[in-house]
Amino acid sequence: MPGLISPNPSPIFIPRANERPRQTTRKSHERFIDDPLLDNPDLGPFLLKMARDAVASRENPMKALDYAIRASKSLERCPVPGVELAMSLHAVAAIYTSLSRLEEAVPVLERSIEAVSGVGTGSESYRALMRFSGYMQLGDTYSMMGQLEQSISCYRSGLEVQIEALGESDPRVAGTYRYLAEAHMQAMQFDEAERFCKKTLEIHREHSAPASLEEAADRRLMALICEAKGDHEAALEYLVLASMVMIANGQDNEVANIDVSIGNIYLSLCRFDEAIFTYQKALTVFKSTRGENHPSVASIFVRLADLYYRTGKLRESKSYCENALQIYTTPLAGVTSEEIASGLTEISAIYEAVSEPEEALKLLKKAIKLLEDNPAHQGTIAGLEAQMGVMFYMVGRFAEARNSFESAIAKLRASGEWKSAFFGIVLNQMGLACVQLYKINEATGLFEEAREILEQECGPCHLDTLGVYSNLAATYDAMGRVEDAIEILEYILKVREEKLGTANPDVDDEKKRLTQLLREVGRSRNKKGKSLENLLGSNLRRKKVGTKRWSGFSFKT
């Protein structure tokens, strides 16, 4: 959690590795309701202290949970509940989180926010702290559940509370701005991430000492955002400034980490010699400070493999991939499964690029296996499954491609990511797999849903949206809905001619498709074209009766 108004974090119990905590039941909660001892106004604070002591001892999480629940039930009975009730509920939620019972933590945190939102005990500033802490803890919980939109909404609510209490330029607000920037970055909302990161840097300029480590960290985040947006020159500038700060503070390992990021920018800009030099410099530092089998060493091997692939040196590329795999398959103690999965995913992309899809698929399956037990990684797993679906499709294994896309779509729906452009693209890809399996009705439904999402997220004139329109026209043609297919193609052709010119090969392709259909129905092209509102309105939603046939033109991937 970012810098709070108070430095006191919520207690979190981490159970021992071999301990299997007993599950509490609904009855164990209900037995507190009629307990007359809970009416004692001194019992709640005492039980809260007992819960904290039990958490600190790390011996029995269920005992800590029992104390915390009883404390919250006792404090609920106070005439005017306030900050102590919120603190007890934070403790309950933190213990639930440590036991991976995230769904149970959510209503508890929502109740903690309600407890300090009206009139109650405690000063207004301390009540604001409790509201802020509740929102941020709730955001973290949603993030661990993979529900990024709900998580960001909670962080924004926490930010509003903090700004109201401290003002927009307080140094503690900078931490929350950064937190939101990272959350938006994770959700691939790069413009919002950039906006919040800029606010963080503005506060640093006003309050922090020159060349502070905090400012350097935020410049590195800004570089990541710029790189994600394709502004590599700006990213390089931010990284160089951050590196200078780290050098001045003697942070050799951090300098090496920044060198890796600088090497990535050089690689994106095709400045290969500079990239190799920068990677090798970082590699020397990592080997000497962390050991030759550390994952950071493997990550540089992967980047060098990518570089040599891009320069056509496939033997060197494959050699670096094998060196990285040797490290990832025999990880050091303490290396996280997320770190290994990320490395395997990067290596699989190189194997896919060098036309070894079977090896790439094996690595992606291993990566999914490492991540599948954590609800927070469901969005990541969905992305990997979609990637597998594309590879299955490319090698002609269409049934497996459809199954991979279907699993990815289910996870994206469950995590609340069903309104993103990525979700629309996955729907389109699953539709293409269904076409290859002769499931034309299912494909049509997928293309229609993809169209709606991409219209909303990208606009009707975006290339991805036009590709879905084209696929939808092909399925309509296959179903005998020729007039609907013609109307879509007329719109596509009109947009492509306006954007690309009449001589573009894509325009020529669409023109041939449209001419073929018009010839079949015996009429000429309507060059005026229909408005998008008319095109996608009731006309396409009416049902037509016709025999299915296979379209005479191709689909857009």
Image (tube, rainbow, N blue to C red):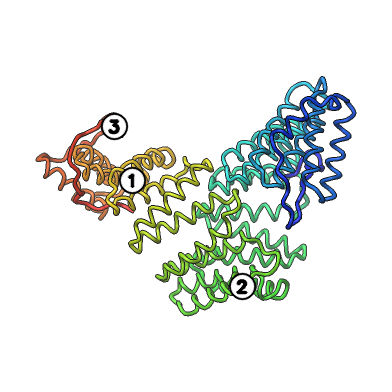
Judge by depth and name the residue closer to the eye, 62 or 124.
Answer: 62
Query: What residue is shown at x 47% (from left), y 65% (from top)?
Result: 349
First in sequence: mark 2 vs mark 1 = 2
Q: Is residue 228 left or right of residue 121?
A: left
CB under 8 Å between discs 2 and 1? no
First in sequence: mark 2 vs mark 3 = 2
Q: Look at mark 2 in the image and give the residue it sits on.
A: 327
Q: Look at mark 3 in the image and give the residue it sits on.
A: 541
Judge by depth and name the residue closer to the eye, 353 or 549.
Answer: 549
Whole-Å distance between the Cαs marked 1 and 3? 16 Å
Judge by depth and name the residue closer to the eye, 223 or 107.
Answer: 107
Whole-Å distance between the Cαs marked 2 and 3? 55 Å
Q: Quadrant of residue 543?
A: top left
First in sequence: mark 1 vs mark 3 = 1
Give the image location of residue 518, x and y in percent.
14, 43
Q: Look at mark 1 in the image and give the residue it sits on.
A: 468
The nearer-to-camera label among 2 and 1 is 2
Q: Secondary structure at mark 3?
A: helix
CB under 8 Å between discs 2 and 3? no
Q: Secondary structure at mark 2?
A: helix
- Type of the residue with mark 1: Val
Q: Secondary structure at mark 1?
A: helix
